[in-house]
Structures are given as structure tokens and as C-alpha cells.
Image (tube, rainbow, N blue to C red):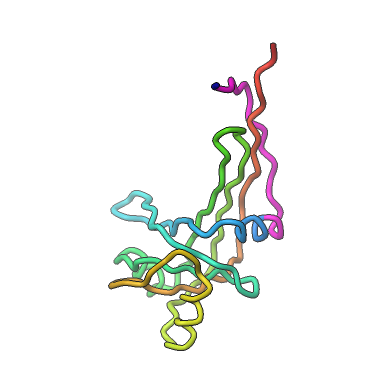
Amino acid sequence: MSIDFAQVRLAPLLRAEALYLLGDISIGFVICARGGMTARQAGFHALERGELVILTVMTAELEALMDNGLPITYLAESVDETTGKGWYATFTGPAEVIIDPLLRRHYQKIVPGFEAGPGTRVLRLRPQLIDGHRFQRLAAGP
């Protein structure tokens, strides 16, 4: 059975709410510019002490951003296709590649669902700007 949606209601997420919701999922995307366009690089994440730990494959674009000291953006979202309810949030801030072997192993253990391979890096993102919305699709009236 298909639901006919007439409207979408958006409600801004508070910082604490966005971080809380982020803890319920483990997959998101690192956003980078590539050739004048925006590209998404898959990542697996966990929260630790208000910081976002991301395991992802390092791309040349992501490496260039970080080498230049520019902030990175991580996008996460969750949508229930049956009800149309969900949320999305972006987390932007300075990030660093974790190179300490003990810390890297620790982070690889707390980030679920990801097996490290060639080109995989552990990033620690300190979100300074968090933006997002909770949304609900409202059923059409009779």
C-alpha cells in the first residue's frame, strides 16, 4: 500500500539532538569538492566525547582539504520509507588524520561495520557547525 504525501514538515535540529540521533546510525558521507562539483565519500562513524570519529577511504580531494587546514563536512541521515519520517544533519569542522597506532586501533574497534583496508584512514572531526532538520511527511487529507 502506498501512502499519498501532501506535505513535508521540517523542524530544525538542535545541536544536542543532532549528536544524539547520529549515535543511532553508523554510516554517513564525507562531502568534498571534486572538479567543481560535490562528491560524497562513504564513511562509518562513532561519537566519542563530542567528537566524530570517521573511518573512510582517503581521496585526493579530502587529503587536499585537510592539508590546507580547511574544515570537512560529514552528512548523516535516517529515513523510514514507510512513514516518511526522518532526519538529516551535517557536521562541519576541523579534522585530523589519526596516525597514532594505539589510538587508531581503539577507534577501529569502536566504529562498527568497517574493515580497514588500503587507503583507509581514521579521521577525528571536531564539529563546530551542526545543521539539520527532522522531517515528517504528512498524509494527504480525504
Residue at 57% across / 33% down in the picture? 82
Q: Is residue 19 magenta?
A: no
For the N terminus, the quadrant is top right
Q: What number of labels is visible?
A: 0
Residue at 45% across / 80% down in the picture? 98
The vertical placement of 42 against 47, above or below, is: above
Q: Is residue 13 magenta?
A: yes
Q: Which residues are magenta?
A: 2-17
Q: Is residue 139 left or right of residue 97?
A: right
Residue at 38% across / 57% down in the picture? 41
Kindly give the residue lying farthest to the top in the view shown.
142
Residues 107 and 58: in front is 107
The location of residue 23, given as percent across then percent down, is: 61, 61
The location of residue 142, given as percent across then percent down, is: 69, 11
Residues 37 and 141: in front is 141
The vertical placement of 85 against 47, above or below, is: above
Q: Is residue 12 left or right of residue 121?
A: right
Q: Is residue 60 left or right of residue 95?
A: left
Residue 11, image quadrant: top right
Residue 129, image quadrant: bottom right
The location of residue 10, given as percent across then percent down, is: 66, 37
The location of residue 86, given as percent across then percent down, is: 61, 42
The vertical placement of 69 against 32, above or below, is: below
